[in-house]
Image (cartoon, rainbow, N blue to C red):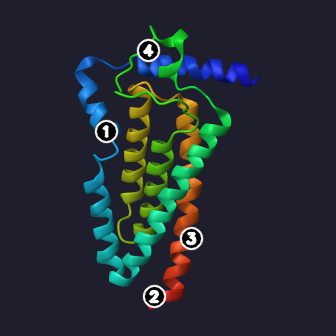
Amino acid sequence: MIEQLLQYDTKLFLFLNNLGSPTWDCFWLVVTNRFTFIPLYIFLLYLLYKKFGLKSLLIFVVVIAIMITFTDQITNVFKRAFERTRPCGVAELADKIRFVAGHCGKYGFFSGHSSNSMATAVFAGLMLKPYYKNLLFILLFWSALVAYSRIYVGVHYPLDILCGFAFGAISGFMFYKLAKYLLNRYVTV
């Protein structure tokens, strides 16, 4: 059953990856770059500061730093435990994929980009939902864009992305709850 699932995953990856064209390569390389969205993160921190104040912002910065470290490190634990080779590292796929990324990496299950972007989207979206009703949906769309970029550039299978999403969503919600607890405990509203 697992083998069948992995075969479907590979077929879906090949389909999605081969939708790309050289015209769009630069766009997706920008989307997949981890530094591209630093202005978005700064803007989200600004919104959190604007709505919650400086003392709360300090709590948010600490919680977010722990959240990103947590999701990133757990992702690495899974990668080392499962040792699923990235599609760009599978010799049988070399002539079938569009490898656009400059670096392949060794293992890919599950996607760190997907888990980190989803955790950020869920955390910030839930914290700011009372003030910006549609922000959560915008951030979820952004997270999906980041995740798809990993398939586009040839470094992750769809299952890597979906599991990264699931883990990121759970992590984002857990750290949202932690931040709410800390705000209630240490910040007088």
> Which residue in the protein does label 4 denote?
97
Name the residue tied to disc 1.
31
Identify the element where label 3 is drawn.
helix
Separation (CA) of disc 4 from disc 1: 19 Å
**Image position of 69 (left or right of 24):** right
Looking at the image, tell me whether mark 4 or mark 1 is earlier in sequence order: 1
Q: Do the residues bearing badges 2 and 1 touch, measured as CB atoms within 8 Å?
A: no
- Label for residue 177? 3
Residue position marked by numbered label 2 in the rendering = 187
User: Distance of mark 4 from mark 3, alpha carbons?
Assistant: 41 Å
What SS does tag 4 mark? Answer: loop
Left or right of 6, for residue 93: left
Q: Amino acid at mark 4?
A: Ile
Amino acid type at circle 3 is Lys
Residue 129 located left or right of residue 170? left
- Residue type indicated by callout 2: Val
Q: Quadrant of the N terminus?
A: top right
Question: Which residue shows up at 35% across the image and 72% down it?
Answer: 48
Q: Are marks 4 and 3 in contact (CB under 8 Å)?
A: no
Looking at this view, is 102 or 135 the one in front? 102
Q: Earlier in the sequence, mark 3 or mark 1?
A: 1
- Badge 4, how many Cα within 10 Å: few under 14, some, many 20+? many
Q: Quadrant of the C terminus?
A: bottom left
Neighbor class of circle 2 (other Cα within 10 Å; few <14, some 14-19, many 20+) is few
- Farthest residue to the right: give it: 1
In the rendered view, tell whether residue 58 sits above or below residue 65: below
Task: Residue 84: give x, y in percent of width and height.
Answer: 61, 29
